[in-house]
Amino acid sequence: MPFAVQFVSPEKVLFEAEAEMVVCRTTDGEIAFLPGHVPFVGALGIAKVRVLVADSNEVVAAVHGGFVEVANDRVTVLSDIAELSDQIDTKRAGRAKEAAAQKLANDPTDADASDALARAELRLEVAGATASATR
């Protein structure tokens, strides 16, 4: 029995589907949601969200913070920035990774550069890119 899933940003609904399962990483650890899950609200970090859609395919998104809410057989991912795997510009993500790595090499305590590196690496992972494919 599938349940509804939505990825929502302030500008639009990025993704909607019927799903069998949703797996995401909250700030407290990884969690999976199945139909009938109890109500839940959790904070998301920089991590991927996997959705096993009703036709047995998997949809993967890069989520850069936000929240996940579960209620009434509906999972809603609320994030300012979320990107489906086929929407990610791997060349841009590769350049961002290199720039962030360079900043961290110059200042290992740069929290913004550390976050930028984590976002770029996540984008590349979700897009299925290798380092050589991004150059």
Image: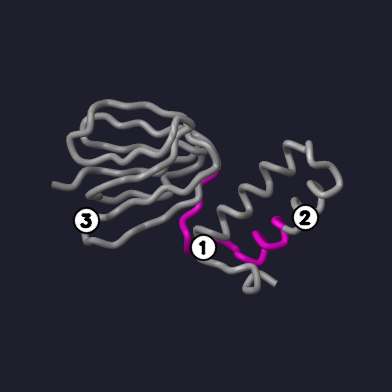
Seen in the image, is 65 located left or right of residue 6?
Answer: right
- Label placed on residue 99: 2
Magenta extent: 80-97
Image coords of residue 37 (percent x, y)? 22, 33
Mark 2 vs mark 3, foreground winner is 2
Q: Secondary structure at mark 3?
A: loop
Q: Is residue 27 left or right of residue 58?
A: right
- Helix, strand or loop for the magenta stretch, by majority: helix
Mark 1 or mark 2, which is nearer the start of the sequence? Answer: 2
Numbered disc 2: secondary structure: helix
Q: Which residue is rendered at x = 33% and y = 51% of the image?
A: 51
The CA distance from mark 2 to mark 1 is: 19 Å
> Mark on residue 127?
1
In x, y percent, where is residue 119?
Answer: 61, 48
From the viewer's side, name the closer residue of 73 and 10.
73
Residue 81 lies in the magenta-colored region = yes
The answer for how far apart the CA atoms under marks 2 and 3 are is 39 Å
Give the x, y percent position of residue 24. Answer: 40, 42
Residue that label 3 marks: 54
Q: Is residue 21 above or below residue 71?
A: below
Quadrant for the C terminus in the image: bottom right
